Image (cartoon, rainbow, N blue to C red):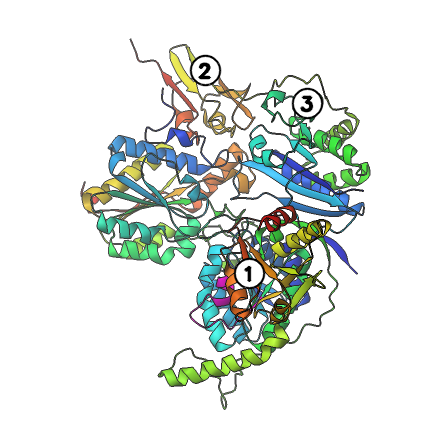
């Protein structure tokens, strides 16, 4: 009969995200994953700037809101001193692939045992809908008013890029909130890869933004299915242990 | 004209900044000195939205003020946000069909009720309730009807999908101009958000809906594979309709639970006896 | 006269266009994002104007430098945490004497802090890099200033070759007021800094093998700064004549202070406002005024960032200085009047 994951902090609900925000779905599946692995007492989360910061009091465990693009190195530093904790770095596609890209790449390159969760909603939502690296070609945003042109690059394939330099033991996957149970499964795999394989893990979660897309629920999921086609889901690197299974 | 300081306030998503921009642009075109300062935060919806407006014949140096002459409150949660700007002389306008007089600070005596949500729902479209209020305030300040309508059209014409939408908006605004606000017998606040959990049971299924968590996004309705969910009459935390369930149709698949971004709903099969 | 009803960000874009800017590099950040968006809308109309939304503010700043080296009137606009990141390119520009124009809309720091309002970026704008602060900082007090000072900033930057800021705040950026957007200032022309001449190539560097060599470079910059300073300094006075007390305030707090002055005058207080338009270099004129003033109130929305400058500039004066600070919180005129009456 429970509507929410146990680890959600009920006092902070309704949360601060907009009606219909995909962050709520991603954070719910993260909550269920933590519930099922029974690790809420050893989890610490860092959150980036952008809409992800609205999760600053989301869970019943320690939460640190950092600066833009800097959640990854902050949590890398924390994990070094607290190797037994399960450490999460939660960020948006801007924080991950624009301002914070070099830190994310180096965390994967060094195989820092943290789990990076990247919520991919196609634009910068908190500032009102500007182009993100993930914005697909031709898409209209407030900084690409006639559609994203070729000279601003195509869509940005973050997990694929990072997989190129990541340690063989890393776990890297892309899921979509159009399949919430798969989001949960990949998050569990990622958390286990951090805990049992002492390795880097990263899950990109394709998400929706009703407010800045100016769309209702139905339209949002239609657009999400186009994004799911452009950015195919799946496990890109399975980590050593998982790969052997 | 003496300096008039006005605050429009309500829920994010109620169009507070839109009616404020309409109002100040029209006032500016009428030749007044105008300043307008929107409250702005991180851009999410669901936090109270406030606009500070000053109108004068003389130069305005600074857009902020301590006390307002007129305060408009369209969402209950905004009361706390604007309380500091009220004093005993403030003329307070509120939506009496969604807010009870008892919710308002007791030291304010000049109270005007406008049951805008009720009128909008009965006569026009729910979303045009803010235009009714805009009509009331335009009349109270003396901003010209045609200037306001021109700006309503400028700001909203993209949202008018057909001529009928435009006509309804225009009628709602004109209706607002004619309203005499309530000062004694206030409409009952019938459109109020529910707080208690709704527990449903039957046809071998049971479930929970939490109105104080539901933001009315409609994802559960869209994701229900059998069409068992639809928008009901009850209102949620943002005064938007919450889902109701047809237990006969429900198959207990838990899609609603897995998709709801707010943890506001679950439906499941009864444990087999 | 061309009067328009504009937000501070919209007025800034009009000023940028009037100044003849060519290109903007930026990264979205509240409350300055509308400058980026507004500039982009103009690039659709005038195809000779360019823009790039970079991956972060550091990149925006260095890309601005690149365009300036090519002789373009390039600029950026930022705020808060973006302004912090902008300090690396600004340090480069400061020492290379590049005409870098930066519009910074102050907000409460650090990180997201508040996206709304503060005056906490004065230190950052004036002294934020690893240099000595050879930067010109105009502080806009209202929507009109955003237009006027933005045009001026480009001219000052290209004339004196120091990085030049226009700082506003979230309230100025987002509030709408009437502004006169006719342009009485003629924009000056930009020139390429790299000459593309193989016989006489240009070498720009911020690396020196000895402290003595570097010291000479810095001394030359400081000499230029001191020479330019009196020509750059600007201020506004309000009811200063005959005033026994003076409020020193910049930006939108100065406007509230003028309201406070009117209120206090009704209470028979002889008080005026001195508003530094350039908070750096700070107008030396205040020192003259201070000598015949009993008391100076420094009022600001930061913990004494302005008053530290004021105290330094007035060193040697015996005038009493009262600091009224509300970091990252705005003032109204009535509130300032109340605070002065009890202090």
Number of the front mark, 2 or 3 = 3
From the image, tell me which residue sits under label 3.
B115
Query: What secondary structure is found at the residue carrying circle 3?
Result: loop
Asked if badges 2 and 1 are on one and the same chain, I answer no
The chain under label 2 reads B
Q: What's the magenta region?
A: C121-137
Q: Earlier in the sequence, mark 2 or mark 3?
A: 3
* Residue at the bottom extreme, as displayed: C199
Determine the image quadrant of residue B6. top right
Q: Quadrant of residue C154?
A: bottom right
Q: Chain of mark 3?
A: B
Q: Position of residue C227 (x, y in %)?
A: 58, 81
Q: Is residue C63 left or right of residue A177?
A: right
Q: Which secondary structure lies at badge 1?
A: strand
| Residue located at (74% from left, 44% from top) | B55
Q: How many angstroms separate mark 2 from mark 1 (CA)?
A: 76 Å
**Can residue C122 be spotted in the picture?**
no
Q: Give me the residue at 46% from left, 63% from top.
A: C59
* Viewer-side label of 1, 3: 1
Q: Locate residue B110 relative to residue C299 in the image: left or right.
A: right
Cα distance, mark 1 to mark 3? 54 Å
Q: Vertically, is B37 above or below C188?
A: above
Residue B249's disc number: 2
Q: Secondary structure at mark 2?
A: loop
Q: Residue at x 36, y 16 (%)?
A: B269
Residue C32 position within the rendered picture, expressed as x and y whole percent measured from the top left:
56, 54
**Label 2 CA crowd tier, 10 Å (few <14, some 14–19, many 20+):** few
**Counting other residues with Cα less than 10 Å from the Cα at mark 1, is it few (<14), some (14-19), or many (20 or more)?**
many
| Label 3 Cα crowd, 10 Å radius (few <14 / some 14-19 / many 20+) | many
Question: Which residue is at the front of the view, B123 or B250?
Answer: B123
**Distance from the alpha carbon under mark 2 to that under mark 3:** 37 Å
Q: Which residue is mark 1?
A: C321
């Amino acid at each position: 009969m429970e509507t929410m994951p146990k680890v959600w902090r009920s006092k902070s609900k309704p949360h601060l995200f907009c009606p219909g925000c995909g962050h709520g779905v991603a954070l719910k599946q993260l909550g269920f994953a933590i519930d099922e692995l029974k690790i809420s007492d050893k989890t610490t989360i860092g959150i980036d700037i952008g809409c992800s910061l609205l999760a600053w009091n989301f869970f019943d465990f320690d939460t640190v809101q950092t600066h833009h693009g800097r959640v990854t190195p902050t949590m890398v530093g924390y994990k070094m001193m607290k190797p037994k904790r399960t450490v999460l770095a939660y960020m948006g596609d801007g924080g991950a692939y624009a301002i914070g890209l070099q830190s994310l790449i180096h965390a994967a390159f060094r195989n820092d045992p943290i789990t990076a969760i990247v919520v991919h909603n196609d634009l910068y939502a908190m500032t009102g809908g500007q182009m993100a690296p993930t914005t697909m070609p031709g898409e209209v945003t407030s900084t690409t008013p006639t559609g994203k042109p070729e000279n601003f690059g195509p869509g940005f394939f973050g997990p694929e890029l990072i997989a190129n330099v990541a340690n063989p033991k890393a776990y890297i996957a892309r899921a979509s909130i159009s399949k919430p149970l798969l989001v949960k499964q990949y998050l569990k795999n990622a958390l286990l890869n951090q805990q049992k394989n002492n390795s880097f893990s990263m899950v990109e979660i394709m998400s929706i933004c009703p407010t800045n897309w100016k769309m209702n629920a139905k339209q949002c999921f239609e657009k999400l299915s186009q994004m799911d086609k452009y950015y195919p889901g799946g496990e890109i690197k399975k980590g050593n242990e998982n790969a052997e299974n | 004209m003496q300096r008039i300081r006005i605050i429009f306030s309500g829920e994010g998503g109620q169009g507070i900044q839109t009616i404020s921009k309409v109002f100040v642009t029209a006032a500016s075109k009428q030749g007044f000195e105008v300043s307008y300062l929107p409250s702005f935060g991180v851009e999410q919806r669901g936090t109270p939205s406030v606009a500070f407006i000053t109108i004068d014949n003389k130069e305005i140096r600074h857009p902020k003020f301590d006390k307002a002459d007129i305060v408009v409150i369209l969402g209950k949660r905004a009361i706390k946000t604007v309380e500091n700007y009220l004093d005993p002389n403030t003329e307070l306008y509120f939506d009496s069909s969604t807010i009870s007089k008892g919710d308002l600070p007791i030291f304010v005596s000049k109270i005007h009720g406008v049951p805008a949500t009720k009128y909008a729902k009965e006569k026009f479209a729910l979303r045009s309730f803010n235009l009714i209020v805009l009509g009331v305030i335009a009349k109270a300040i003396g901003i010209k009807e045609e200037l306001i309508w021109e700006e309503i059209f400028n700001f909203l014409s993209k949202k008018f999908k057909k001529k009928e939408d435009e006509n309804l908006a225009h009628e709602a605004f004109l209706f607002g101009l004619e309203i005499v606000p309530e000062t004694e017998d206030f409409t009952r606040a019938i459109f109020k958000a529910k707080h208690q959990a709704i527990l449903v049971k039957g046809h071998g299924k049971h479930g929970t809906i939490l109105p104080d968590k539901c933001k009315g996004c409609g994802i559960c309705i869209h994701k229900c594979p059998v069409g068992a969910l639809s928008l009901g009459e009850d209102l949620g935390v943002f005064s938007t309709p919450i889902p109701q369930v047809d237990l006969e149709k429900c198959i207990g698949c838990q899609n609603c639970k897995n998709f709801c971004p707010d943890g506001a709903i679950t439906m499941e099969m009864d444990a087999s006896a | 006269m061309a009067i328009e009803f504009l937000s501070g960000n919209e007025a800034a874009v009009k000023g940028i266009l009037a100044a003849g800017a060519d290109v903007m590099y930026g990264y979205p950040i509240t409350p300055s994002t509308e400058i980026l968006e507004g500039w982009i809308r103009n690039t659709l109309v005038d195809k000779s104007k360019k823009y790039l939304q970079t991956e972060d503010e550091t990149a925006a700043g260095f890309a601005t430098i690149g365009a300036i080296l090519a002789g373009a009137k390039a600029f950026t606009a930022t705020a808060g945490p973006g302004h912090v990141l902008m300090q690396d390119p600004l340090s480069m520009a400061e020492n290379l004497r590049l005409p870098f124009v930066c519009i910074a809309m102050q907000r409460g720091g650090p990180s997201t802090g508040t996206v709304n309002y503060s005056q906490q970026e004065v230190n950052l704008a004036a002294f934020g890099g690893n240099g000595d602060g050879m930067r010109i900082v105009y502080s806009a007090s209202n929507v009109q200033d955003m237009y006027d000072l933005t045009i001026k900033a480009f001219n000052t930057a290209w004339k004196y070759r120091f990085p030049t800021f226009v700082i506003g705040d979230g309230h100025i950026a987002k509030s709408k007021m009437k502004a006169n957007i006719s342009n009485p200032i003629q924009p000056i022309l930009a020139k390429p800094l790299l000459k593309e001449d193989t016989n006489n190539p240009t070498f720009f560097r911020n690396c020196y093998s000895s402290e003595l060599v570097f010291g000479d470079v810095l001394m030359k910059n400081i000499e230029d700064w001191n020479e330019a300073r009196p020509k750059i300094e600007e201020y506004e006075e309000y009811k200063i004549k005959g005033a026994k007390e003076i409020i020193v305030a910049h930006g939108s707090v100065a406007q509230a202070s003028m309201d406070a002055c009117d209120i206090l005058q009704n209470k028979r207080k002889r008080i005026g406002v001195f508003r530094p338009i350039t908070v750096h270099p700070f107008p030396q004129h205040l020192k003259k005024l201070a000598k015949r003033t009993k008391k100076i109130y420094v009022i600001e929305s930061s913990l004494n960032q302005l008053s530290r400058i004021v105290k330094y500039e007035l060193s040697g004066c015996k005038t009493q200085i009262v600091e009224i600070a509300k970091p990252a919180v705005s003032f109204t005129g009535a509130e300032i009047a109340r605070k002065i009456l009890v202090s």
